[in-house]
Amino acid sequence: MRNKFIPQISLGCVPIPHIEIDLNSRDDIPKILLGLQYLDQDTKKRDAALAQIEKDLGEKVNLNNGAPGMTF
């Protein structure tokens, strides 16, 4: 079964807000990562984004399949 979001952090993992992103990079990835960090902090927007992902996947993917603990 796929879960939208698992709030419990695994042992040894760095919390998402504490990850340092290289802002001097010329690549686009740091901008995307900053946006994902922001979404992780704002629960209303995160839930809205996950609802949109579920809506997009719901028609194509069986939400009851998947590895235990698998998230969107």
Image (cartoon, rainbow, N blue to C red):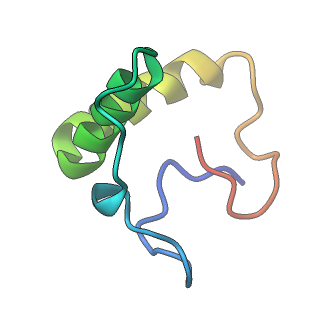
For the C terminus, the quadrant is top right
The residue positioned 41% from the left and 67% from the top of the image is 7
Figure check: 14 above or below 21: below
| 60 vs 13, nearest the viewer | 13
Q: Quadrant of the N terminus?
A: bottom right
> Residue 37: horizontal and vertical position, in percent?
30, 43
Q: Give the residue drawn at x 49%, y 63%.
A: 6
The image shows a total of numbered marks equal to: 0
Check the image and name the residue furthest to the front: 24
Which of the 4 quarters of the picture holds residue 30? top left
| Along the line of sight, the residue nearer the viewer: 28 or 70 | 28
Question: What x and y, as percent, mark residue 29?
Answer: 46, 23
Q: Residue at x 28, y 57 (%)?
A: 17
- Picture quadrant of residue 33: top left
User: Residue 42: x percent and y percent?
Assistant: 17, 45
Q: Where 59 sits versus 39, above or below?
A: above
Please state if 68 lies on the left or on the right of 57 as rendered.
right
- Is 7 located above or below residue 42 in the figure? below
The single residue placed furthest to the bottom in the displayed view is 11
Quadrant in the rendering for residue 49: top left
- Residue at left offset 63%, top offset 22%: 57
Residue 52, position in %: x, y?
42, 22
